[in-house]
Amino acid sequence: MAVIEITQDNLDAAVQNNDILILDFWAPWCAPCRAFAPIFETASASHEGVVFGKINTEQEQPLAALFQIRSIPTLMVFREQVIVFSQPGMLTASQLDEVLGKVAELDMDKVRSQLESQSRADKA
């Protein structure tokens, strides 16, 4: 599957309409971002059912602010509309494969239950 450009206009649809969405926050001037791009592109071809999106933080500054991106590249993975992974820094191909494998194995009912418990505790 091709890597898609994510903007403010299509972010909500990408999150809502895909079981697993991985986002790469990057900028054209960022050398590690450029080094990571081929790894991300190659992974997109080998992970069926995962949508790969890139967010150019220079062009989409409100999205970078919304997600509190402080360092690039930053990877963020949504599973069933829940952020289940967020990490700054470049990953190797094997590390990216490992992350996506673990995301696919998550028990989302358990994840949602933990989030609800945490939310209740935060409000108390």
Image: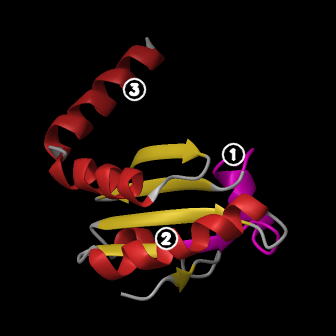
* Residue ID at (27%, 51%): 103
Does residue 11 appear in the picture of this structure? no
Of callouts 1 and 3, the N-terminal one: 1
Image side of residue 8 versus residue 61, left or right: left
The Cα atoms of the two marked residues, 1 and 3, are separated by 20 Å
Which image quarter: residue 110? Answer: top left
The residue tagged 3 is: 119
Of the numbered discs in the image, which one, if any, rests on residue 68?
1
Q: Secondary structure at mark 1?
A: loop
The Cα atoms of the two marked residues, 2 and 3, are separated by 33 Å
Q: Which residues are magenta?
A: 53-71
**Label 2, residues with CA under 10 Å away: few <14, some 14-19, many ≥20:** many
Q: Amino acid at mark 2?
A: Phe
Q: Is residue 59 magenta?
A: yes
The number of discs equals 3
The Cα atoms of the two marked residues, 2 and 1, are separated by 21 Å
Of discs 2 and 1, which sits in the foreground?
2
Residue 120 at what x, y percent from top left? 36, 21
Of discs 2 and 3, which sits in the foreground?
2
Image side of residue 86 versus residue 16, left or right: right
The residue tagged 2 is: 40
Q: Secondary structure at mark 2?
A: helix
Location of the C terminus (image quadrant): top left
